Amino acid sequence: MTRLCVSLTENDTDGMLSAMRALPPEVRIAEVRLDMMASCDIPRLCLSRDREIIVTNRPVREGGSCAAPESERLTALRTAAEHGAEYVDVELDAVGALGELPAGVGRIVSYHNFRKTPADLPRVLRRILAAEPDVAKVAVKANDIADCAAVFDLIERQTAERPLIALCMGEEGLATRVLAGKLGAFLTFASRDEGAESAPGQVPVRDMLGMYRFPAIDAATEVYGVVANPVAHSMSPPIHNAAFAALGLNAVYLPLKVNNPRNFLDAFEPRDLRGLSVTIPHKEAMLELMDEVEELAARVGALNTVRIRDGRRYGCNTDVSAAMEAMTDAVQRAGRKELTDCDVLLVGAGGAGRAIAHGLAGRVAHLTIANRTVKRARQLAAELDAAWCPLDAISERRPDVLVNATAVGMWPKVDETPAPASMLRPGMVVFDSVYNPVRTRLLQEAEQAGAITASGFEWFVKQAAAQFTLWTDREAPREVMERVLRQRLAND
Ligand code: NAP
C-alpha cells in the first residue's frame, strides 16, 4: 500500500519533533528536511521521534536549501543513518560520495528537475536503478497537466524489485501526488499545512486525508475532476469528494488545471477517468472532443459535464436543467404562476447567460435579454427569437422574473448590484447566478422588497448533484454537498 509521508520543514529540533507528534496517526512516516532547518541535533531528533523518518539534506543544486560543503552535507545524512533513521534520501549524483550505510537503513536515490518533465524519464530511472537504491525517486516539474502521463507511465512500468516514488511538482502535477496510491507508488508526499510545502504542489495532509481520502485510494479507484484554468479556487473538488465519501464510493475527484483538453484526455483516460465537470475556458472546446453530445448542450454550444463509459465520451449540460429547476422552485414558492406564464428579464449574455437563455427560450411567456456589451445580447436574442434591451434600460422593466447572469455582485465586489433596488417589488422572483457570496446585494435588496429569491448557491448544488447522478447512477447526497459548499464559502 502506498504510504503517505508528510514533509516537515520546521526550523529546529524541538519544532521538528513537535510538528511530527502533531501529525495524524494515519501518517506513519515523515520526511525531515534538514536543509530547511536552521539547526538540528540529529542524534536527539532520531532518538525522540515518534514515527519512521526519511532524512533529506537537499543541496541547492538540486532545488534544496543546503549550501554547506558536500562532505558536511553527506556527513549529516550518515549521522542520521547511524542513529537509526529508516531512510536517507541521496541525490543520484552523490550516491558514490555517500558510500555505504549501516544495514537496515533504506537508501532513497533521487532525481529532481524543478524546470520541466524531461522527455527521457525512463533513462533517468534506469540510471537511478543502476545505483541499486532501496527506493528510487523521481520528482519533476509539470508545466502542463499532460506531463503527468510520463510519471504515470513510469510508475505503471516499474519493476517489482525496486519501490518507486515518482511525482510531478507544481499545480499541474497534483494528480500524480493523489493518484500515487492508485498506481502503486512507494509513497507520496504531503505538506504539514498550506504554506509549509517543501516542494511546489504538495497537498496539505488535511486535504489528502479528508478531501481525497488518500488511504482508501487503490487500483480500482475511479477518477473524476474539474477541468478548468484557473482551477485552484474551484468549489467542485470538496463537494464531489464529500458526496463520493458519503455514499462510500471508491472514487476521487481532482482539480485539473488544463491548457489543452485533448492532451489532457489522452493522458488521463487510460487511468480510469470516468467523469468531468468542465468550466471556463473549456466548455466550448470540450464539445468537439465528445463521441456523443446531448442535444441541449449542442444547442447551447457549451457543455459542463462529461461522462466516460466503455471508452465513449458523452457530453451534456447540467447547468441548464439545474437553473430551470432552481427558477421553477422559486416561481412556485412565489405562488403566482408557472414559469411558462412568466415575463423574464435575463441580465447577462456570457456562458451562464447563454445556458439560462437556452433553458428559458420557448418555455416562458416572454424573454428579454440585456447585457453590458449590447452586441452579445442582440445576438443571443436573435438566436433564440427573444427580445433584447440595453443594460441601462432595465430599470424601466417590470418582469415577473429577474435573472442576474453577470458576474456583478460577486466576491470581492460584493457592494455591486446589476439591477437598481427601485425595480424590485413584492411577489417578483429574483434569481442570482452568483454563489459567492450566497446572499448577494441583489438578493438582499430583493428580499427587503418582498421578492422571492433563488441563489446561485442553489444552482451550483443542483448542477453538481445532476453531474454526480449522471456519473454514478445514484441520487446525489445534496445535503452533504450543500453543507460542504457552505463551509468552504464561509472559509474562503
Ligand atoms: P462570463 O462568460 O465571463 O460572462 C460574464 C457576464 O457578466 C457577461 O454577460 C458580462 O458582460 C457580464 N459582466 C461582467 N462584468 C460586468 C460589469 N461590471 N457590468 C455589467 N456586466 C458585467 O461568465 P459566466 O460564466 O457567464 O458567469 C457569470 C456569473 O455566473 C459568475 O458570477 C459565475 O460565478 C456565475 N455562475 C454561476 C453558476 C452556478 O452554478 N451558480 C454557474 C455558472 C456561472 P459582457 O458581455 O459585457 O462582458
Image: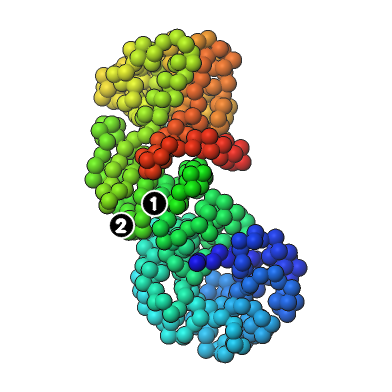
Q: Residue at x 40, y 53 (%)?
A: 222
Calculate the distance from the C-alpha at mark 1 to the C-alpha at mark 2.
12 Å
193 up-or-down from 316: above or below: below
Side of 403 where 15 appears, left or right:
right
Residue 362 image-quadrant placement: top left
Q: Which mark is residue 258?
A: 1
- For the C terminus, the image quarter is top right
Q: Residue at x 65, y 59 (%)?
A: 24
Residue 87 on image: x %, y %: 59, 78
Q: What amino acid is found at the position of numbered circle 2 in the picture?
A: Asp
Check disc 2 and report its element: helix, strand or loop. helix
Along the horizontal axis of the image, is 428 left or right of 381? Answer: right
Q: State left or right for residue 130 relative to residue 19.
A: left
Report the label total.
2
Asked if the residue under mark 2 is in contact with the one under mark 1, i.e. CB atoms within 8 Å, the reply is no
Q: Position of residue 180 (x, y in %)?
A: 46, 63
Residue 323 vertical position relative to residue 90 in the rendered view, above or below? above
Q: Is residue 320 visible?
A: yes
Q: Quadrant of residue 476?
A: top left
